[in-house]
Amino acid sequence: MSDTDVGVDVGAGKLAVIACGGTGGHLTPGIALAEALRERGANSLLLTSRKSIDKRLLEKYPRLETLPAPGSGFSVRPAGFAKFLLNTLRGFLFARRLLRERRPSVFVSFGGFLTTGPALAFWLAGVPVVFHEANRVPGKAVRFLKKLATQIWLPPDVGMRGLREGVLCHAGFPVREEIKPLPKVEARRALGLPETGTLLLVTGGSQGAAVLNNWVRENLDAFAAAGAHVLCITGPGKEAADSATADGATADGVAEADGAVAAEVVPVVKFVPFCDKMAEALSAADVVVARAGAGSIAEFAACAVPSVLVPLPNAKDNHQDANARYLESLGGCSVVSQTQPAALTAEVLRLLADSAAREKQRDILRGLRPRFAWEPLPAAVAKLLEK
């Protein structure tokens, strides 16, 4: 299917178009919103990118209708800016054809490079435009296009200047229905991990984080000495050439003696490029080390898992640091700079050894769930669809 081939309308009723591709942080809230609208009897079409991460994530949701759309990120470099303008035009024309053939009733964007062209097309056609920004520093797309919006949904206590009355709304990050706490034993069995012992989960988000992967490998002996298992989600293309293990541990997490499995289970170390069982991974973990994207934080809160956040230092507008510091101010996490690996190791080992501190953070996260509630968003979109 080409970038401008939008197909034939086979759906019934009103249609919401949701732009959400490019990264897990954009795509997963789009999936969550589409699921919520489906439960309300509404149709939705997800505009996605052609990236492998989109294809992989969407494999679990065959009932959702998706369509790859053109777009590219803004750049001040001449070549990048020319590409941005070209793909914005392509996105605009793509959306114009979509409007003619599918007659959608509302456009929702979760930010990112698929936003600009379609938002302009929908606005010119008089279709309500809704933006959702879960980071505590709104992105460029939302800031630039705010005048087009019927509604802009921001995190609690976050504002934006220059909006018409009634445009600003507040809601948390849309979390997929499947992301919820599970019994620890059940979660670990699903992941092939030991049912006993502490577990450290390390994830750099959908793209992975090489600096966190390397930090894990450099500290495997320290984690083994602490009796902790490790599950590291490396990100696509960032897998280890061979499985790194602590002394006495093998790649599949058991020690062998004289050709037989030893009676005593040693700490398990697993490196995987991708995990499509995040509810299980978060429920199995005692501590998670991760970047500070809004989606990750929302999932940690949903599963009440203690975390040590390592904000991406070159994130646009330093939004990950703002996300992490906000959660830290509420007592829901610890924050360590990636330039301080020794401090990161010390904080992780402290939490792994202190079950009372972990439980205190879990209690705080459970109490914060109303602050992260996002249910007003699908209710508002459904209301727009009824008009």
Image (cartoon, grey):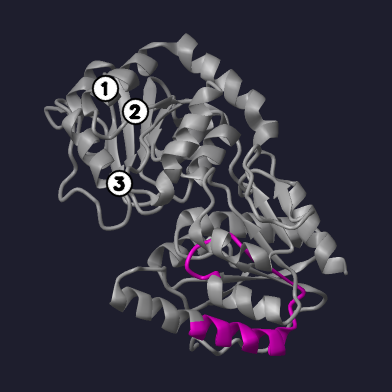
Q: Amino acid at mark 1?
A: Ala
Q: Amino acid at mark 2?
A: Val
Image coords of residue 145 (percent x, y): 59, 66
Numbered disc in front, either 2 or 3: 2
Q: Tell me the magenta residue range.
A: 89-115
Q: Does residue 232 appear left or right of residue 117 in this picture?
A: left
**Residue 114 belongs to the span the image colors magenta:** yes
Rendered view: 366 above or below 113: above
Sort mark 3 into few (<14), some (14-19) or many (20+) by Cα contacts within 10 Å: many
Residue bearing mark 1? 343
Residue bearing mark 2? 336
Mark 3 → mark 1, Cα distance in angstroms: 18 Å
Q: Report which quarter residue 167 is drawn in.
A: bottom right
**Residue 117 belongs to the span the image colors magenta:** no
Please, which residue is most extreme toward the left here?
258
Sort mark 2 into few (<14), some (14-19) or many (20+) by Cα contacts within 10 Å: some
Image coords of residue 189 (percent x, y): 46, 35
Mark 2 → mark 3, Cα distance in angstroms: 15 Å
Residue bearing mark 3? 209
| Label pair 2/1, CB-CB below 8 angstroms | yes
Q: Which one is earlier in the sequence, the residue at label 2 or at label 3?
A: 3
